Amino acid sequence: MSEPILQVQNLTMDFGGIRALNKLDITVHSGEIAALIGPNGAGKTTFFNCVTGIYKPTAGDVFLTPGKGEKPVSIKGLKPNIVTGKGLSRTFQNIRLFPKMTVLENVMIGRHCRTKTFILGAIFRPPRARREEREILLHSYRLLEKVGLAAFANDFAENLSYGAQRRLEIARALATEPHLLLLDEPAAGMNPQETEDLNALIREIAAEGLAVLLIEHDMKLVMSLSQRIFVVDYGSKIAEGTPKEIRSNPAVIKAYLGE
Amino acid sequence: MLRLRKYEEEEMITAKDIRRILLVSGWFMILTLPILGMRVDPLSDNILWRLKNVMWVGLGTVVLQSLPHLWHLYLYLQAGMIRLWHHLMGTPPHKIVEKTAHRDSLINRVITNPRQRAILCAVVLTLTIIYPQVVNEYQINIMIMAFLYIMLGLGLNIVVGMAGLLDLGFVAFYAVGAYTYALLNLHYGINFWMALPLGGIFAGIFGLLLGFPILRLRGDYLAIVTLGFGEIIRVILENWIELTHGVAGIVNIPGPTFFGLGLTPSQKILYLYYLMVLFVVITIFVVNRLQDSRLGRAWLALREDEIACQAMGIDKRRTKLAAFSLGAFWAGIAGVVFAAQNRSVYPVSFSFLESAMILSIVVLGGMGSIVGVILGALILILLPEYLRELSQYRMLFFGAILVLMMIFRPQGLISVVRRKYDIDSIKAEEKEGGA
Amino acid sequence: MHFDSQYFIELFASGLTKGSIYALIALGYTMVYGIVGLINFAHGEIYMIGAFVFFLASSLLTVLGLPMWAMICIATAASIFWAGGYGYTVEKIAYKPLRNAPRLSPLISAIGMSVFLQNYVMLGQTEKYLGFPEVIPEFDFLEPFASTFSSSDFVIWVTTVIVMLILTWIIKFTRTGKAMRATAQDRTMAELVGINVNQIISATFIIGSALAAVGGILISSHTGSIHYYIGFIAGIKAFTAAVLGGIGSIPGAVLGGLVLGMAESFATGYFSSAYEDVFAFSLLVLILIFRPAGLLGRAETEKV
């Protein structure tokens, strides 16, 4: 397997008296599609929030490899925008698009951390700034084409259908040029056809060298896509392995179906 | 056919409605009885009754509440007329359909069409340039004041309208600019032109300093803290007499010089007017560029969803500080101009009420919309001047406008139009770039 | 340095008085914030209106020649009635329609309401300062303390304590009080268990306004004057007190009021009196930046 891109060690998250994450160890490798599954309330989104810097973990550490061949750095406790700058991007469980901006603009926001034009550049628009703006436009538009939303470029994001909004969130996350993409229930609310399209899209993204870690409840999608699956319950990892191994793991079956 | 039927079938007014109207009016009459209906004669301590006011309140509330019903009546009659018309014309039933196509408002359509926009700008500019030739000095001064408020409104618009930070202490930066010019002139003889960038820069630095501590604050707390800042500045202006001369203010501030030549008083006013036009044009240009840039998009994202915006790699602190200090810079520049126009500065000009007024302009016009803010400034500044008899009710209107706009039209008179990118030209560029 | 204990006690007494008034007004802020999450910017104006109504009512009743105690009772009742009425109406007009709007909308609306009411009273009455009748009599049994504090101070303290006790009783033991606490914790659940949330919210505003009115009467009698602008400054200071104690917490509002009153009194007594307002504003700014939860409040975490 290739080098590890994300190494989570001993991650623990307490909210007051409640332990949401308990000593989690999860490693995702470059180019891998991995999945994080578990019953509702198991702490999956909390895990994403800890890794991306929205929560500061109570204990443990998170290491990210910011580039090919580079050494892993600790991103524990770093601000979300810094984490994204280092190559980790995500989507949200309850879609968090910018509703009053157009579809294209939503994706353009993703380019922010890879571009530089600031106040003076915005006001005077020297050639460098104009070049950068053109690049932002082109790059974003191509991403829209990739997720199949190019036709809606100038529509307001809030006017898109649910499935289209999820794809837009992915395009936006891709615009930040991540090495690892965290998808939080990307197939939620999608019909079978949309889920199929999503499956193909994620494969395409991974084929380009991106690692993907997704939280999902749609087992068919998870089993079809993932090379590795992590199962959590009540904040602890209860199993880890290939889809085949997980399917027949008694602890997993117990967690989902009860005794 | 269905739309027509609706107006005819719904009850226009019921007994319950009438009872409600009377009760509400009665309640308002009771409420206003002491404040509007009674006064104490300061000399004799007797009560002066002014019950006529209360009666007007009663009448007014009845009329206001009847308006929706009257509107319903109007639509009913209109529907009837349409029916009659089609009946006379013999139109087949399936063709009677009401047009309900959704279109952008007229103003927005004109703005986004480049050619129409250019024509509109040319017309407005021409009118603006001719204006002083056809009106008297007093009116020119009023227009100068309106321009000042346009600058202030556009500056606040960057902070509130674009970045979504409710700054209630904006007037503090205005004061910094004005007092910078006043003091530099007083102690070092600095003239207007040198003071202009200095006032802006000092105010901008102030904005940075004030901005740092408030970065983490949420919406309403941010508003209150900035309000606190504004008031602190005002009190300091009033009390730090050695520096600011306190309530007496600083007087004899010279106006802007015209290449060192002497000007007659009326020429000076004309000069100031055209200077203001130039400043406003520059402000509009800069704000427009900012809105349509990487930074402008970042502000909008920040305003829409702070968490998602950070997750997408935007440095929240840097973005907020940029908005804050840019807005402050602009207020500082406006402050220098204010000092030059008024020839004096007093602390009383920089109260919270002033911040509230500028906020009203932005809220009325449309948060984030340049044309909206200009319109808002013109309406709120010019109207009271031209309706002199009502000028004492000015602040009353400002307050009411804030409330009414939030309830009925929070996006303002002119809602923001996002830029629609020309996809075909993007693709052409793509081919050009040999991508 | 010679420690002037008499001066210290005087400042303490004066701080207690100020603090009591701040506490009365702060309660209104904190209760409303606890229940609808809104900073009722116009609350200070309610306090001012309460004072004005008392002033007008007492002028009217004096002309009619009623005995002092009757006049005070009726005027106070009138003041509470009208203040409550204004509080109720402001909520219905400016806040209720915006209950589901983004947070900034009701705040802007509140600011508008505050500006509106200030000018409404200014136009309806006068922009000048008016002399307020000093309705608190001099009590003989307080004569020995006359150099430290006045009867007016004493009455303010006692009234505040009594009002606190009544409020606590309402919140803890009446159905309305329980409903208020429930609505403050979880509005949706409160509705589901059958609480008429609109009525409870209105009741909260009315009670807060009544408290503010009492505060207005007391302090105006104490200082001997009223003006349409007193609501603004008092409002901000009372809000500072509420935040200091922990916004949403009733004991916090009282604690915050007392702390602020004391701090202001000692700061102006030992340093300078011109910067009195700056002191309160600076305190507000510092608390919001460093400890927004206040002394007794709990820090909120947003769910992502």
Image: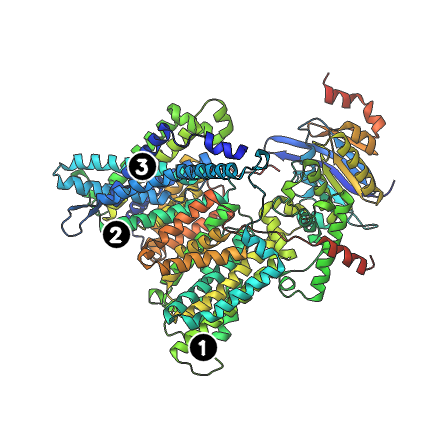
Quadrant placement of the N terminus of chain B: top right
The residue at which mark 1 appears reads as B188
Q: Chain of mark 3?
A: B
Q: Amino acid at mark 3?
A: Ser
Most extreme residue toward the left is C65
Measure the alpha-carbon separation of dots 2 and 3: 25 Å
Residue C206 pos. (x, y %): 35, 34
Which residue in the structure is indicated by mark 3? Answer: B25
At 70% from the left and 54% from the top, the residue drawn is B422
Q: Is residue C138 visible?
A: no
How many angstroms separate mark 1 from mark 2 (CA)? 43 Å
Question: What crowding class fits label 2: few (fewer than 14 Cα within 10 Å), some (14-19), or many (20 or more)?
Answer: some
Amino acid type at image mark 2:
Thr
Quadrant of the snapshot with the C terminus of chain B:
bottom right
Q: Are marks 1 and 2 in contact (CB under 8 Å)?
A: no
Nearer mark to the viewer, of 2 and 3: 3
Residue B208 in percent (x, y) is at 54, 59
Label 1 chain ID: B
Front one among B213 and B58: B58
Residue designated by label 2: C126
> Is disc 2 placed on a helix, strand or loop?
loop
Q: Foreground: B61 or B225?
A: B61
At a point 49% along the width and 32% down the height, the residue shown is B6
- Position in image of residue A15 (x %, y %): 61, 34
Give me the residue at 42% from left, 44% from top.
Answer: C110
- Residue A144 lies left or right of residue B12; in this view the side is right
